Amino acid sequence: MRQGEAVFVDSGAWIALALSRDPLHSQAREQWELLRGAGAKIHSSVPVVIETFTFLDRNANRHVALAWKEAMYKPGTVRILPCELRDLEQSWEYSRRADLHKLSAVDATSFAIMKRARIRLAFAFDHHFAVVGFRLVA
């Protein structure tokens, strides 16, 4: 990873960071520290924020979900990218691909958003990001 490189953070990485009981928590913390140390420009998206908050709220509790949201919204932490209609339209193309079995709609929109924003590096534990050509930090 290059110093100051843009990185897109997926729901799985956010969840692993937020939940100490998550099996990927230690790996996520280590990767997060490396990203922060390299001055990575952290990005995520509206669909990822909604998916992550909902997961934390339902699988932990509202306090955990709100604490994650507060930490993420600290100035300079993460830039939240919108999901535009053209991103949604482009995401359907990923859903048609046979090599992306069980692809979530949020991941498909993430690919479109990353492509539009010219972000090539993903902090994700989902192999689909690599299948479509993004580099993984985790």
Image (tube, helix red, strand yellow):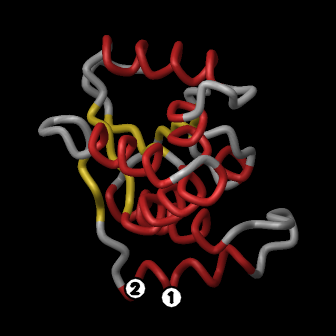
Give the position of the N terminus as an image quadrant: top left
* Residue plotted at (30% across, 70% down): 82
* Residue plotted at (42% across, 13% down): 34
Give the residue at mark 2.
86
Mark 1 burial class by Cα count in 10 Å: few <14, some 14-19, many 20+? few
Q: Give the percent coordinates (x, y) of residue 128.
A: 72, 52
Mark 2 burial class by Cα count in 10 Å: few <14, some 14-19, many 20+? few
Give the residue at mark 1.
89
**Number of numbered discs visible in the structure rendering:** 2
As measured in the structure, the alpha-carbon distance from the residue carrying label 1 to the one carrying label 2 is: 5 Å
Near-viewer residue (41 or 134): 41
- In the displayed structure, 76 sits above or below 130; it is above
Residue 70 quadrant? top left
**The residue positioned farthest toward the left in the image shown:** 75
Position of residue 91 in the picture relative to residue 3 (left or right): right
Near-viewer residue (70 or 110): 70
Q: Give the percent coordinates (x, y) of residue 104.
A: 69, 68
User: Is the C-beta separation of discs 1 and 2 under 8 Å?
Assistant: yes
* Residue plotted at (31% across, 11% down): 37
Residue 46 quadrant? bottom left
Give the structural element (helix, strand or loop) at label 1.
helix
Give the amino acid type for the residue marked by disc 1 in the picture: Glu
